[in-house]
Image (tube, rainbow, N blue to C red):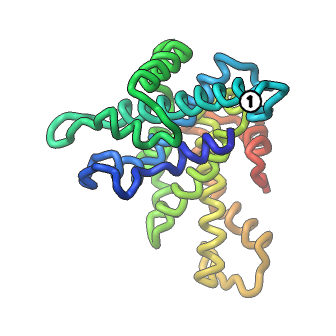
Amino acid sequence: MEQVFEWILEVMPADDHKTSYSPGDLYDLLSSSPETRFHAGYLFVRYLLHVRSASTLASLPQTGGKSPEDQEALEAVTWDVAVACLALSIKFHRDVLFPLDVIYVHEFLDLAPHEMEFEDLENAQRDVLEAVAFRVGSATPGAFIEELWDALTPLRRLVSFDGRWEAVQEEAWEILNDALQQPELLQYPPSLITGAAVIEAVVEVLQRSYKTAGVDGRGKPVGKRDARSLRKVALKCSRGVRLDIQDILQISNEDLRACQKWLGLTTG
């Protein structure tokens, strides 16, 4: 499964792909919308957990005694579903009203890492839609991240300069994308996972900025402090923001610690 998730998170149109490279086209969307890629991965997980047990998901792609023909067929279907999930996510997040244009089916087929026909894509999309009960839309991290930025003045004061907010978002998406590959993903609400990711991202970015600038958030020289010491300072300076994030997303201390532990994040 790791290869599938890597493909969803990294695939781009080939250099010889017939695309306009204009704002809003397939290349632009995949270059600038981590939300679209995450949503595709989330759909993929939802599909798998509807057709397989969580333990099977964790063990794939082990062959488990399957014949080479069966294994090849399973891999083909898996890739069909992955392409379908990406196509559905792109359709969900991208408008086609003027001045934007439609993305044609051959563009999705060209992205596929294997031989794929129009009927394969149509059937795979139908299978995914049926598996998720035609509920493609879900609360994905992008909306929560935007809400936090708009609602929390302390967050803007803390990371609105020197490219910090862009770095926070990048760090948060890395954490979220890593979470996609965990079988327990659907056990945690997207708001909780997003909150934990943003909280950790703020601490990481502050820690790096203190080391680069040579002073902490209070203007005190950091000298030769080690990473652990700088992290403590970053945790202290961002404590108010953490509490605000927990408040606006309704996250308890217990739930936050459990999610941080699951994500493999340091809690202190």
Residue 92, placed above or below residue 203: above
Does residue 13 appear anywhere in the picture? Answer: yes
Residue 4, placed above or below residue 49: below
- Of residues 33 and 79, the one nearer the viewer is 79
Determine whether, in the image, residue 141 is placed left or right of residue 64: left
- Image quarter where the N terminus lies is top right
Q: Residue furthest right?
A: 65
Residue 194 coordinates in the image, percent (x, y): 59, 42
Q: Residues within 10 Å of mark 1 (few under 14, many from 20)?
A: few
Q: Amino acid at mark 1?
A: Pro
Residue 110 coordinates in the image, percent (x, y): 40, 42
Q: Quadrant of residue 183?
A: top right
Residue 86, placed above or below residue 265: above
- Of residues 16 and 191, the one nearer the viewer is 16
Determine whether, in the image, residue 63 is placed left or right of residue 156: right
Q: Quadrant of residue 189?
A: top right
- Of residues 173 and 206, the one nearer the viewer is 173
Residue 71 coordinates in the image, percent (x, y): 71, 28
- Of residues 170 and 19, the one nearer the viewer is 19
What residue is shown at x 20% (from left), y 41% (from top)? Answer: 100
What residue is shown at x 34% (from left), y 51% (from top)? Answer: 17
Residue for badge 1: 68
Q: Residue furthest left?
A: 98
Residue 256, placed above or below residue 49: below
SS state under label 1: helix
Does residue 243 appear anywhere in the picture? Answer: no
Residue 246 coordinates in the image, percent (x, y): 62, 41
Determine whether, in the image, residue 180 is placed left or right of residue 151: right
What residue is shown at x 41% (from left), y 21% (from top)? Answer: 119
- Image quarter where the C terminus lies is bottom right
